[in-house]
Image (cartoon, helix red, strand yellow):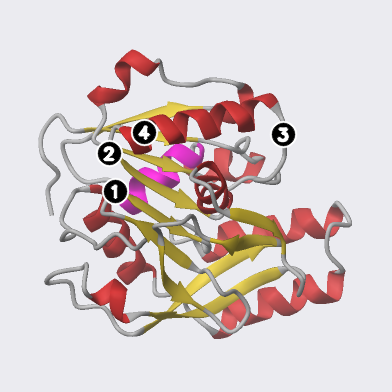
Amino acid sequence: MKGEEGKRYALLLAANDSDYVKKVYGGYLNVFVEAFGEQGEKWDLFRVVEGQFPNLDELHNYEGFVISGSPNDAYGNDDWILDLCFLLQSLFAMQKKVLGICFGHQVLCRALGGKVGKSSSGWDIGVREVSLTNEFYSSIDELIIPPNLSIIECHQDEVWEVPIGAKVIGYSEKTNVEMFTFGDNILGIQGHPEYTNDILNNLIDRLISNNAIERGFGEEAKLQLMEREADRKFWAEICKSFLKGRWTQLPTYF
């Protein structure tokens, strides 16, 4: 489907480009545009992890914003994380479309009044099945989406509580909040709909080499990737339809 000519979107990049992603994809911006972009759109990159933010007086120029994953903790108090929270609060007040992925999902929740922290059950790396709720189906209008979708995961933090007024629309056996929404302008997804298997495989190798995870655990996750495919096509359609305003109005819960 073609995007509307001249529509602008912004990627708020909360991680540095890995050497692998730079070499194979030319950077994470290209990964996200390939997954969520449509013909005729313009996507701008803001490396928020390096303190690069859009000007507040230019926010109205964008149809939507995507917050990437990050090796940082969404509950941290680094200056750039606090600045990001302020930006997200501003975008929420402006009713701009904001899609948070992994760290982005968590920091979006935090900025809007929810709670995030370490998962009590440790790392989740590999392919995980997410169950979608009835509230999700009440919002997607004419999209045909199965009730259970597999997604690539790589996180050790999670959303503990969604903000007051938000709604959980996806969960898994391991993570209670795999997806949440707030009205029709906020969407958080814990997994990585933009990831390909090779990106995760390379990330697992780096986590093993950095002693962030045990080799056996990492190799098991890589084996799982060989045995199961994530439902990337469905996830991309969910994310694109949200960003392009093709969802129906979601109810707000108080």
Q: CA distance from mark 1 to mark 4?
A: 9 Å
Quarter holding the N terminus is bottom left
Magenta-colored span? 27-36
Above or below, 211 against 119 in this view is above
Q: At which x and y percent is residue 15? A: 61, 38
Q: Nearer the viewer, residue 112 or 192?
A: 112
Categorize mark 1 by other alpha carbons within 10 Å: few (<14), some (14-19), many (20+). many
Q: Which amino acid type corresponds to the residue marked 3 in the rendered image? A: Asn
The reply, left or right, for residue 9 in relation to residue 32 is left
What residue is drawn where x is 54% and y is 66%? 197
The part of the image, by quadrant, that contains residue 44 is: top left
Above or below, 155 against 132 in this view is above
Above or below, 187 against 53 in this view is below
Q: Which residue is mark 3?
A: 77
Q: Which residue is mark 1?
A: 185
Q: Are marks 2 and 3 in contact (CB under 8 Å)?
A: no
Categorize mark 3 by other alpha carbons within 10 Å: few (<14), some (14-19), many (20+). few
